[in-house]
Image (cartoon, rainbow, N blue to C red):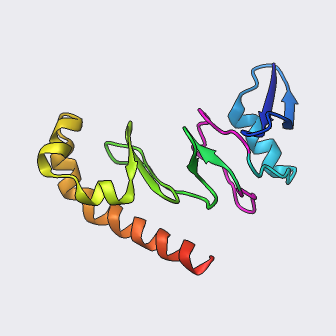
Amino acid sequence: MLIQIKNWLTDTVMFSHTQENNSLEITLKLAVKARADLAGANLYGADLTGADLTGADLTGAKYGDGIPLEHIPIILQGTKYYIIIMDTHIKIGCELHSHAEWESFSDAQIAEMDSGALEWWNEWKGIVLSLSLGHQQRIAKGE
């Protein structure tokens, strides 16, 4: 199966790979290994679990509906919810919100998100927001 990674603005093919049982994850890993320039790549729907993006140029990369992803995100596994801390947003489970929104959610708002979410948030809030702050500080320093 042919998989193509395209520029999200121009729709031009940036990298492609064909193999039986191919996936976007396989193609992306090969693109990174080949040091392909993926600046502006449309990675919508890509499951990057376990992908080693060390050295990848993510300049102009977007997550979902245009959320900037220019720095390698922090990914946490092993809790009830999968956590991705990105440049400007945090995704916890299926909930995607800005850093500021996560900081300002009330207990009632968190409780409405999922059964047991408030208990989980009370346990993990400090860790998630501390990692988010550290990520923001690294980005501001240009690291």
Residue 92 inside the magenta-drawn segment: no
Image-quadrant location for residue 113: top left
In the image as oriented, which residue stretches furthest toward the bottom?
A: 141
Task: State which region is magenta.
Answer: 41-59
Residue at image location 61% in from the left, 35% down from the top: 44
Image-quadrant location for residue 42: top right
Which of the pair 96/25 is nearer the observer?
96
Establish if 15 lies above or below 19: below
In the image as oriented, which residue stretches furthest toward the front?
A: 9
Q: How many marks?
A: 0
Residue 51 inside the magenta-drawn segment: yes
> In the rendered view, does 64 fall on the left or right side of 43?
left
Q: Position of residue 82 (x, y in %)?
A: 41, 44
> In the rendered view, does 20 fall on the left or right side of 97?
right
> In the rendered view, does 69 fall on the left or right side of 12?
left
Residue at image location 70% in from the left, 61% down from the top: 54
Main secondary structure type of the part rendered in magenta: loop
Residue at image location 34% in from the left, 60% down from the top: 100
Which of the pair 80/9 is nearer the observer?
9
